[in-house]
Image (cartoon, rainbow, N blue to C red):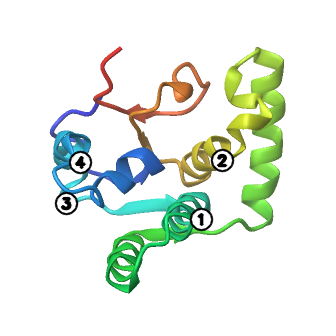
Amino acid sequence: MTSPGQRGPVVVDTDVYSAELVPGSLLADRYAPLLVGRWVYISFQTATELRFGAQLRGWGSTRMQRLETRIAAAETVYPGPDLVELCARFRVELHRAGHPLAQKVHDADRWVAATALRLGVPLVTNDGIYEGVPGLVLETLRES
């Protein structure tokens, strides 16, 4: 969890970042204090997941514009050679440690975590898959 003095940049996981798109979202309300006034990064993977979900559900132009505005509110981090190499090494480390984040089903989550590691900033998430990941600093309000 974060203390009031920690106001540096963060990577925000898809679950928390997308919550603002849901009217009346309790998750968005809960995490707002962690995000207000902070520089926010999202992984290219988060932008991909958000667009995929919207297109799959056939969102109209008004909702799609709202989505694009939401995506543009953060700085999207794209995979370059350094992030790709880090993500590969990261998966090996997770695999050797027996952490479930190494599993193929968590490819998207691993990109998000690798983004936070590459930038050296905390990851804001409500997803328990990131618990116990060596070197990853989490800011979460998740109830265990």
Q: How many C-alpha atoms fall within 10 Å of the one at disc 3: few (<14), some, or many (≥20)? A: few
* Residue 108, disc: 2
Which amino acid does the dot numbered 4 rest on?
Ala
Residue 44, horizontal then vertical, whole percent: 60, 65
Give the amino acid type for the residue marked by disc 2 in the picture. Answer: Ala
Q: Residue at 34% x, 79% y: name it.
A: 69
Q: CA distance from mark 4 to mark 2?
A: 21 Å
Camera sees residue 15: yes
Residue mark closest to the camera, 3 vs 2: 2
Q: Residues within 10 Å of mark 2 (few under 14, many from 20)?
A: some
Label 3, label 1: how many angstroms apart (C-alpha)? 25 Å
Task: Please state which of residues 65 and 89 is positioned toward the viewer in this rendering.
Answer: 65
User: Which residue carries the number 3 mark?
Assistant: 37
Residue 104 picture location, percent across and down: 79, 36
Ranked by sequence position, the earlier of labels 4 and 2 is 4
Quadrant where the N terminus lies? top left
Q: For mark 1, what is the residue?
A: 48
Q: Earlier in the sequence, mark 1 or mark 4?
A: 4
Q: Which secondary structure, mark 4?
A: helix
Q: In which image quadrant can residue 34 be found? A: top left
The disc labelled 1 sits on which kind of residue?
Answer: Thr
Q: Amino acid at mark 3?
A: Gly
